[in-house]
Every structure is written in structure tokens, then in C-alpha cells.
Image (cartoon, coloured by chain):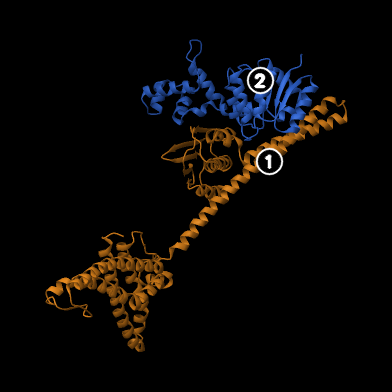
Amino acid sequence: MPGLRVVLAEDSVLLRDGLAALLARFGHEVAAAVGDSDGLREAVAAHEPDIVVTDVRMPPGFKDEGLRTALELRRRRPGLPVLVLSQYVETRYATELMDAGDGTHLGYLLKDRIGHVSEFVDALQRVVDGGTVVDPEVVRQMLRRRRDPLAALTAREREVLALVAEGRSNLAIATELTLVEASVAKHIRSILQKLGLPQTEETHRRVLAVLTFLRS
Amino acid sequence: MRTADVPKAGVYLLANAVTGLLTLLVSVLLFAAGGVLAVVVVGLPLLAGLVLVGLPVAAVERRLQRLIDARPLPSRHRVPPEPGLASWLRTRYTEPGTWRELGFAGLLMTVLWPVDLLAVVLGVTVPPVVLATPVLFGTIGDAEQVNVLKAVPVTSWPQAFLAGAVGLFAMVACACGLVLLARLRAALARLVLHPRRDLDQTVVELTRSRVRLVDAFEAERSRIERDLHDGAQQRLVALSVLLGLARLDAPDGPLAEQLSRAHDEAGQALVELRELIRGIHPPVLTDFGLEAAIADLADRCPVPLEVSFAMPQRFSAAVESAAYFVVSEALANLAKHSGASRGTITGSYAGRTLTVEIADNGCGGARIDGGTGLIGLADRVSVVGGRLSLSSPPGGPTRLIVEIPCQACG
């Protein structure tokens, strides 16, 4: 595996040195190590690196300048591998990054992960190879939102779905809930749409919806 | 000063003179009757009633003030706690306003009313008489002699016209003088009846200092968050990197095990530090605003939540942080105490008011002062001019609404 040419942007000198030592240990070359976003822009222009590793938070504002600069670099050079290091588990930062371009050659890792040195170096290589790397902790956070697909349903729609799961026909459901049959059909359409069940010939959507209900 | 002010000033002074005179008469009568009858005890209530003479006087003065000063001069009397004469009397005798008004009545019936009366009478009569000198000289004086104001003799036409000119000047001067006097009198009455300035200023100053305190508090939180982020956290990451590198080189054995334990500890410390920072001041709130920060809170809540919170606008840091911490506390209570199986968070910004509602289907019975963090949050919301309302009947459901009037900025 040939060594990678890395541009490193990190405002803490201590961590910058640690990262440089780590990368050197694995045979990668740190083409430039900078401490702010202007430096990062210049270094990328000057060194044409294989990958950019940057902190989210950087001077002068100590907000998300690092992330903004990474996005800007990607706009200018689509496909430039970028690995963003962050202390933020909040999903918004990662999604902001992943929305850049086609979402490949990108990585978003919590800084905790750097300590797991081999994992970190693997992630670096995967990003360079065109992969997408998101920190497992952030993924967990993202998945929590999808945990309950039924959460999107209204109370009435859940009632309807529960009766569908009991095997009732639309007419039976309408009688049970004292609705007209047409509005039961409307509720079911809305349920199928909210559960993201596509309209295809191969699957029975009603059964899939029931399965979703039973699983939750 | 407008011409319309002159008759108003005249009416004000005249009405005051009449009120003062009447007050004097009534007071003297009451005092005399009370004094005479005091021997047979019946007089004592009359004397005590004398204290209340300021009440109608002040009421009249408040009405008359409208002629001179457009600023309202509301009565500061307290409302008696119970109906009935006893309660009314108790309230009136114990509040400072009554005594203040008695003082004003005393001033009016001794010093002020003669001054008012004199000013109006002289101001209205003297200048016309002087002004009319040429006419008087020609008619009554037969173009030979007339005594202006029965004091200054005028014996020729030029003198008569000069006196007329002086009269014209006196008329203008008296008009100005009357208005000025009326204003002074009104200001004096206002000062005696209503020394509101110092109290109001204290309230304004207190409000300002409270806002300053909260701002300082907010700034301090941001500073601590930043220090932790850029100091302790970076050092811990660097330590973790060093330990990770050391583990690569360590031969198998007890040393490798110890390094591994130390490495895990450093990792755990990082996780805890991250949680701590989030509790102090979440960076996502600063960087992306309420919508993202509240979505994150909802993700962490163990109870499934329906979130409809589309809010691209950004607000001032104080407003955002007040709204954020209300939601944070509400969700913590929801998860801990409500026993709810579902919840909703709704947010909207309309009519320059940010409204956030957190509702659940739990057991209810929550109280703002019930030992939760809600009371502190209510204070925090009130500092930014908003309010927190809670509806949580026993048996549920619970709804918490925070409304903050604010300007969107960007």
C-alpha cells in the first residue's frame, strides 16, 4: 500500500503533532499541517494531496469553519477525499458533509476514533478509495430517528393499521371505526406512503405494512 | 406654548382656587365640629374623617391635570381586600397614598389657592384695562385725564397710546405667565401625589441588570464550553492517540493490558466530556439553530416523538438557548416522570412570536414549581420577554408551551 499524501488541518498543536506522528507511523506523508481554514485552502492548492483531514471547529470563529472549508474544497474539486474529524455526535454536521457532491470519498469521524489508530488509518484508506465512512456513534444516532417507522402515522392511521393487521377488510374497518369506506382507503394509502412501501407488482404492500406494525 | 393652552391654564388655576377654598371651608367646619363634639366622643370620627379630605381633592386634581399634562396620573390607591366600609377604611388609613393626598390638600387650602386665584384674577383683568387706556381716555377722561388702574395718570394722547401698547405687552406676558404657573402647579401636584419616578427607574434598572446577568451567564457557559472543547478535550484526544500508538509497539503481556485499560479509560473520559459539553451549551445550537438542535434532542429521547419543527429562521443566542433548554428539560421530565408512550414537539414562528409546544399522552400532574427544573426555565424565558405555560391535569395529557416574542435574524 503506497503512502498517502495528507493535508492536515487542526488548530490544536498537540493533536496535530499526534496525528502527524500517527500517519508517519503508518507510512503516510503529511504534506502540510495547518491550523486554520485559510491555511487549509492554500495547502490544498499547493500540495494537491490524496486526502484532506480537517477538524470541524477551527479559528477564527471556533464554529464549524473546518466543515465549511471542506465543503467549499469539495465544490471546487469534486471527488477530493475529505475526512472530517469532529467532537460532535449531532447528526446535522455529518449530514451536511454527506450532502456534498455524490457522497463518496467522504468521512466523518469522532475524534475518539483517532485513538483506535488502526481503525482510523483504515478509515483514511477507505475514504481515499472512494468509500463513505461515518462514525458508528453518529450512525447509531441517525438510526434512532428511524427506530419507529410508525411514529410518522397519526393516531387514527395507527388504529386503522392495527385493524388491518387483524385481517379485517376495509369495510369491516369502516364499520368498526364508524367511518366511510372511502376514508379508510384514504388512510391506508397514507399509511403505505408514510411507511415508504413502493407501488410494485412483486410485493403485497398491505402485508408489508402489517409486518412493520408487528415488528414495532 | 400654544394659544389654546392659555384658557386651559386659566380654567385649571381657577378650578384649583375654588377647590382649595372649598377644602378650606370643609376642613375648618369638620375641625370645629369635631373639636367641639370630641368631648362627647361623637366628634372623634369627624376628626379622623378629616384625614380623608385629601381623597376627593386628589381626585379633582387628577381630572384637572388632563388640561395641562397629557401623561396619565392614575390613582395609586390599593383595592380593599374585602367589600365593606371597615376594609375600605383600613386600606385607606394604612397606605401612603392617603397621607400624601392629605399633604397635598393641606398645601392647596393654605398656600396654593390664594396664589392661583390672585394670578387668574390679575392676569385676566389688568392687561385689558391697561390696553383700553386710549378708549377710556377718549370717553370717560374727555381727552384730558384718566388714571390707569386708578394709579397712573395719563394726560395726553401719546401717553394714552403708550399705555395701550404696554397693555398689549402685559396681555402676552400674563398669558405666558398663566401657562407657566399652571404647568408649575401641575408638576408640583404630580410630584406630591405621584413620586413615581424613582420606583419606575428602580424597576427599569432591575430589569436591565437581570438581562445583563443572564447574558453574562450565557457568555460564561459559552466560554466554559469553548475551554473544554479546545483544551481538555483536545488533550484527551492527543493522549488517546499516544496510548493507541504505544499499544501498537507494546509487546504482549501485562504492560499491553495496562495500556489497553488506560486507552479505554481515556475513551470513556472523552464520551463523558462530550455529554457534559452538550449539557452546558450544545454547539449544534450555535452552528445550525433551533431546528437541528431540537431534532437532536428528540433523537435522544427514549419516548417516540412526533416532531414538526420547521424553523429555518435564526434568533438571538439568548432566545434560542432559552427555547432549547425548555425543550431539553421538558423531554427529560417526559421520559422520567410522565409514563407517556408518545409525545409531540411543535414549533412555529408567526406574528413575531416563537412558539414551541411539547405535549405527551402521559399521566399528567406536572407542576412548574414541582421541584423540576421548570421554574428556573420559566425565569429564563421571562428574561427574554417570553412566558411558559403548563397544562397538566392529573391523568394527563401534559402540554407545555413556551412563547417568546422575538425578531428573526437571518
Numbered badge on residue B105: none
* Residue farthest to the top, as pictured: A201
Q: Is residue A84 left or right of residue B99?
A: right
Callout 2 amino acid: Ala
Please give left or right for residue A112 compared with residue B33 in the image: right
Badge 1: chain ID:
B
> What amino acid is found at the position of numbered circle 1 in the picture?
Asp
Residue B220 can be seen in this image = yes
**Letter of the chain in orange:** B
Seen in the picture, residue A125 relative to B114 is either above or below; the reply is above
Q: Which residue is mark 1?
A: B227
Question: What colour has chain A?
Answer: blue
Q: Nearer the viewer, residue B339 or A95?
A: A95
Residue A45's disc number? 2
Residue in the image at 70% along x and 19% along y: A47
Q: Residue at x 45, y 36 (%)?
A: B348
Disc 2: which chain?
A
Say left or right for B249 vs B373. Answer: right
Classify 10 Å Cα crowding around label 2: few (below 14), some (14-19), many (20 and above).
Answer: few
